[in-house]
Amino acid sequence: MDEVNEETWQAFFKEEALYSQYEKCGLEVYPKELVDLTQGRYISPVLQRDRVFNPTGEFSRANVMEFIRQTSTNQEFAIYWKYTEDRMRDAQLMEKYLSLVTQSHYSNSLDLKRVVADRNTTMDITYVAQPTATVKDSTQVTETAMRDYYQKHRKQFEQKNNERDIKYVAFPIVPSEKDIELTEAVIEKVYADFQTLKPADVVNFTTRNSDVPFSSYYYKKGELQPKLDSFAFRATTADVLPVFREDNTFYTARVVKSRMLPDSVRVRYIALDDSNSHLADSLITVLNNGANFGYIAQEYSADPVSKKENGDLGWRRQGTIIDTCFMTPKNKLIKIEAGFGVQILEVTDRSAEERKVQLAIIEKTARPREETYQAIFAEASALATEANTQEEFEAFAAQNNLTVTPAGALEEGDKTITSLGAANVRELVRWAYEVKVGEVSQVIPLDDYFVVATLTAIRDHGIMPFEQVRWNIEYTLSEEQRIDNLAQKMKEAAAGATTIEAIADKMNLSLSTAANISFVNSNMENIAGREQKLQGAVAGAPENVLTGPVKGDMGVYMFTVNRRHVGSAYTVEQERAMEQNRTRYDQMALMQFYNVLEKAANVQDWRGRFF
C-alpha cells in the first residue's frame, strides 16, 4: 500500500511540477532509448528493481523479453508493460534533468586559479584566543532588542514543514512468564515426537510444527547461531538437539543431510523460451557430441546476456542459482524447467568442496495470549483514563515508574519514530495533528506496543511565532553581546601594545601557534570548530603586524602573521579533480530541487491526513 501511495503521489507531482520543467529544457526520451533501456547495455533501474521481471531478485533479460512477447496476446501484460515504459521514461527524464543541473555548476579558469592561489598561500601565526565559554559575563537582552531581531530576521525563523512534538509512554506487548511456560510445554511435546521420527519424515514434520518454514539451504560451518552450529557439525541424522531458549523463542533441530559441496560454482546456460523449448534435448545431444556451447547460446538463447557472454553466468553462490547446480558434476549438462521455458545449464567450475549440512530447525516463539494482551491494555488504559493534561500525564507516569519518552519534529507523513523501532506510528502521528497542546491520547495500538501520548508543541508551516523562538533569539543576542564585550576588553588591552606577547601578558592568556593556515584550510589548536572569520582575517593580514581583535562565532582573537609562504605544490588539475568529486557529492543534495519545484508549483502534500 505504501508503495502504491508513493507512486501515485510521484505521478501527480511530476505532472504538476516536473513536466513543465522538462519541456522548458527540451528534454525527451526517444523510442530507441527505451529499447536500449530494456535490452541494451545499460538496463533501466526501473526494470532491475521490478519483482515482476525479477522474482528471484536477480535481473534476467530473458524474463523481460518473454514478458514483452506475451503482451501481444495478454491484455494484462500489455497494460503493465505500458505502465513500466512510462516509469522508465520518467526515470530517464529525471536523470537527464538532474544531469543538466549538475553540469550547470562548474568553476571557470579564473575561479580555479584563485582557489589554487588560496591553497598555495599559507601563513604561520601566533595568536591568543578568548572563547566565550571560558568567561562568566552576565548579559541583559531587552525585550525590544529581541523583537527587533525577530522582525529583521523573520526569514530565518521560517518553518518549512508542519511539525509536532509529543511525549509518550510505550507499553510493550510481550509474552508473560505464563505464556513462555506454555510455549515451552508445547515444544517439549514436539521434541518428544521429533526424537522418534524416521529420517524420511523429518522435513514434513518440521513444516507442520515449526513457526518458521523448513529451509533446504545447506549451511557451512559458522553460518548458524552457535548452539545450532555446534550441533549440526557433530551430529548424525539420528540425533536430536535438546530444546534450548534464546529470548522468547525455543529451538530444537535434526540433521537432514550432510554433503561435501562447493561454496560457489561457475555456470553457463542457454535460455529457451516456450517456442524453442522442444529443442532442449536435441541441443543437449549436440553439445554432448562436442558442439561449441558459446555458438549454441548465441544462436538459440532467449537471454541477450547469455548470447553476448557465450552463455557464461559467472560464479554463483547458493541462493543465487538453483541448488541442483551445486550437486551437479563439473561439465555435465542438465535441463531445468523454468516459468518461461527451459534452461540448459552446465557447471564449468567448482570451488573447493567443504562439508555442508541441511538442518531441520523447529522454532516456537512465545506470544502474548489474550489474557496477557488485556492486562497490558489495562495498564495503558489507566494512564489514558487518569491523565487529562500534560501535567497529569507526567505526574501519573512518575508515580507509577513509567518511562516518558519525548519525540520531536514529527511531520504529518511520518511512519516511524526512532525510539519505537520499526513500529508503524501512523495512528499516533495522525492523532498528534488532530489535537491541541496538552491533550492526552487514548490507548493507541502500534504493532508490538500500546502507546499513550501527550502533545507538547505545535509548529506549523510558515514564520514561527515570536514566543516559539524567544529563547533562540535571547541566546543569539546574549552571545553577540558577550563577544562585543570581550572584543572591547581585548581592544583596551591592546592599547599601546605592539606584540602579541604583550597582549597575552595583559589578559593572562596563553600564546598559541598555528602553521600552514590558508584561506581554505585552518589548523589552529585550542579552537573548537572552524572560525571562518578568523581564517579570512589571517589570509588578508600583513606580516609581523599585530592584528585584531577579530570577532569569531565562539570567541575573540588577536594574532600576528609570522610568515607568509607562496608555493606551487597544489595544481589546477588537482582542484579540477576535487571539483568533480564535489559535483558527484552534490548529486546527493540535488533532490532538494523537489522542494524548490514543489513550492514553485504550489503543491502541498496532505497525504498524512488520510494514509
Image (tube, rainbow, N blue to C red):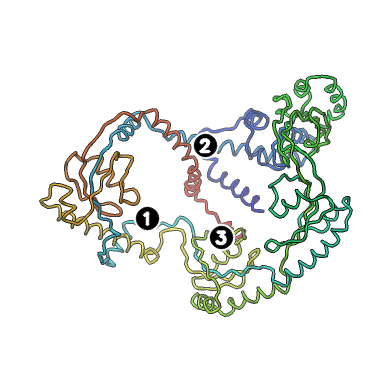
Residue on which the image places disc 1: 156
Q: Earlier in the sequence, mark 3 or mark 2?
A: 2
Q: Quadrant of residue 463?
A: bottom left
Residue at which label 3 appears: 417
Residue drawn 58% across the image and 77% down it: 383
Q: Residue type at mark 1?
A: Gln
Of residue 248 and residue 40, the one placed in the foreground of this image is 248
Quick one: label 3, few (<14), some, or many (20+) residues within 10 Å? some
Residue at (26% x, 61% y) in the render: 135
What amino acid type should be assigned to the residue bearing mark 3?
Answer: Ile
Cα–Cα gap, marks 1 and 2: 30 Å
Nearer to us: label 3 or label 2: 3
Residue 459 location in percent, x, y?
A: 46, 63
Q: Between label 1 and label 3, give the one nearer the viewer.
A: 3
Of mark 1 and mark 3, the one earlier in the sequence is 1
Mark 1 is surrounded, within 10 Å at the Cα level, by few (under 14), some (14 to 19) or many (20 or more) other residues, namely: few
Q: Is residue 53 visible?
A: no
Q: Nearer the viewer, residue 408 or 119?
A: 119
- Residue 342 in which image quadrant: top right
497 displayed left or right of 285: left
- Name the residue rendered at 84%, 24% in the picture: 283
- Contact (Cβ within 8 Å) of mark 3 with mark 2: no
Percent across and percent down for residue 251 are: 75, 59
- Distance, label 1 to label 3, CA atoms, is 27 Å
Q: Which residue is mark 2?
A: 97
Contact between marks 1 and 2 (CB within 8 A): the answer is no
Which image quadrant is residue 171 in? Answer: bottom right
Quadrant containing the C terminus is: bottom right
Residue closest to the far front: 234
